[in-house]
Image (cartoon, helix red, strand yellow):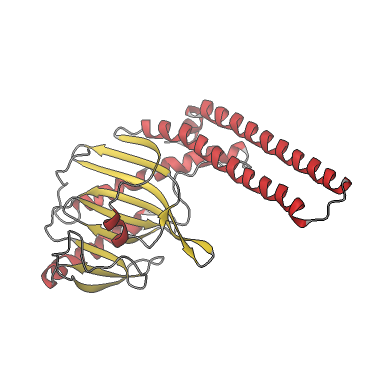
């Protein structure tokens, strides 16, 4: 899409989203006014207990975070459906959590729980398909809550090989491999180092049921990961890959989640820039789908989107 036609086509939604932003900011301003009145009353009442002064501030901070989240959700729900309509086969699924099995999640991702719901897309192009979820994982570390993963989880069809495989960072603790992917009867996997495949990634270890699978597929998988990292335009990188008989899961570490449109304190011009950027980001899962469907066999997989 050209910048001019993109802005023209989305002029109505920009006005709608901007009007909502103005309302949210007005509500936030009113809340700040209430806090100031509360402070003046406390001073007049000669209250000197810290908690009386802290509570309104904490309340305003929480309300500000709520308004920012409401605005981001509102803008995404207006902008993303129109962007997806511009490309046949794309669908915007709103805000969801990924449909990944817990055992697969433990193998693929660092420890942590999904922090709410995030933008979800899916695409079906003949026999090729993908599902993409922005994800944030959080876990407890002592008395603090920390982010253990920030990025994208991409699901693709099975790529037509019998051996399950898992590539993930060598230094990060993830789920135990003793039961592998399919159950307690699976053998302990063989493993080999893939090394560091991108400037932003970590050293990866590849696990497979036996050495023969490693010998056959390790070079191909390493090449696919390198090609995938070349698709990204920022510091995003393939963090882990899980290949099963049903699906291929790719975890992409990304400090800035794709399709993020609008901040509550951004000017209107910044919103149009966000729309243009999001339209470019739509090409990434499509290109990855093409790479992975052809990377091992040279022909697309025959699985259909369900």
In depth, the one of 100 and 184 nearer the eye is 184
Residue at 36 percent across and 56 percent down: it is 252
In depth, the one of 36 and 51 nearer the eye is 51
Percent from the top left, x then y, of residue 126? 20, 37
Percent from the top left, x then y, of residue 288? 29, 50
In depth, the one of 184 and 292 nearer the eye is 184
Percent from the top left, x then y, of residue 142? 51, 68
Q: For the N terminus, give its image quadrant.
A: top left
Q: Is residue 143 left or right of residue 94?
A: right
Q: For the C terminus, give its image quadrant.
A: top left
In depth, the one of 212 and 33 nearer the eye is 33
Number of marks present in the image shown: 0
Residue at 47 percent across and 37 percent down: it is 76
Q: Residue 303's quadrant in the figure?
A: top left
Residue at 11 percent across and 70 percent down: it is 212
Percent from the top left, x then y, of residue 174? 33, 66
Residue at 35 percent across and 48 percent down: it is 284
Q: Residue furthest top?
A: 12
Q: Is residue 192 left or right of residue 282?
A: left
Q: Is residue 127 left or right of residue 264?
A: left
């Amino acid at each position: 899409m050209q910048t001019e036609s993109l802005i023209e086509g989305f002029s109505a939604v920009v006005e709608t989203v901007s009007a909502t932003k103005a309302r949210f900011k007005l509500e936030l301003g009113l809340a700040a006014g209430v806090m100031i009145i509360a402070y003046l009353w406390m001073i007049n009442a000669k209250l000197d207990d810290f908690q009386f002064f802290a509570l309104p501030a904490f309340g305003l901070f929480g309300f500000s975070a709520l308004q920012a989240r409401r605005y981001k959700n509102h803008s995404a729900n207006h902008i993303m459906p129109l962007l997806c309509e511009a490309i046949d086969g794309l669908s915007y699924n709103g805000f969801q959590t990924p449909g990944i099995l817990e055992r697969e999640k433990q193998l693929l991702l660092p420890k942590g729980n999904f922090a709410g719901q995030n933008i979800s897309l899916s695409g079906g192009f003949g026999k090729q398909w993908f599902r993409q979820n922005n994800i944030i994982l959080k876990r407890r570390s002592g008395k603090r809550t920390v982010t253990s993963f920030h990025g994208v989880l991409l699901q693709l069809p099975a790529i037509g090989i019998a051996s399950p495989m898992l590539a993930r960072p060598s230094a990060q603790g993830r789920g135990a491999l003793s039961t592998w992917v399919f159950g307690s009867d699976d053998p302990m996997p063989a493993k080999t180092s893939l090394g560091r495949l991108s400037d932003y990634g970590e050293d990866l270890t590849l696990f497979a049921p036996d050495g023969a699978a490693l010998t056959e597929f390790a070079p191909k998988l390493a090449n696919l990961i390198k090609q995938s990292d070349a698709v990204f335009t920022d510091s995003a990188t393939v963090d882990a890959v899980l290949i099963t008989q049903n699906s291929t899961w790719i975890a992409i570490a990304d400090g800035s989640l794709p399709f993020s449109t609008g901040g509550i304190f951004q000017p209107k011009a910044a919103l149009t820039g966000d729309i243009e950027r999001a339209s470019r980001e739509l090409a990434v899962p499509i290109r990855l789908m093409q790479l992975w469907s052809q990377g091992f066999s040279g022909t697309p997989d025959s699985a259909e989107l369900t």
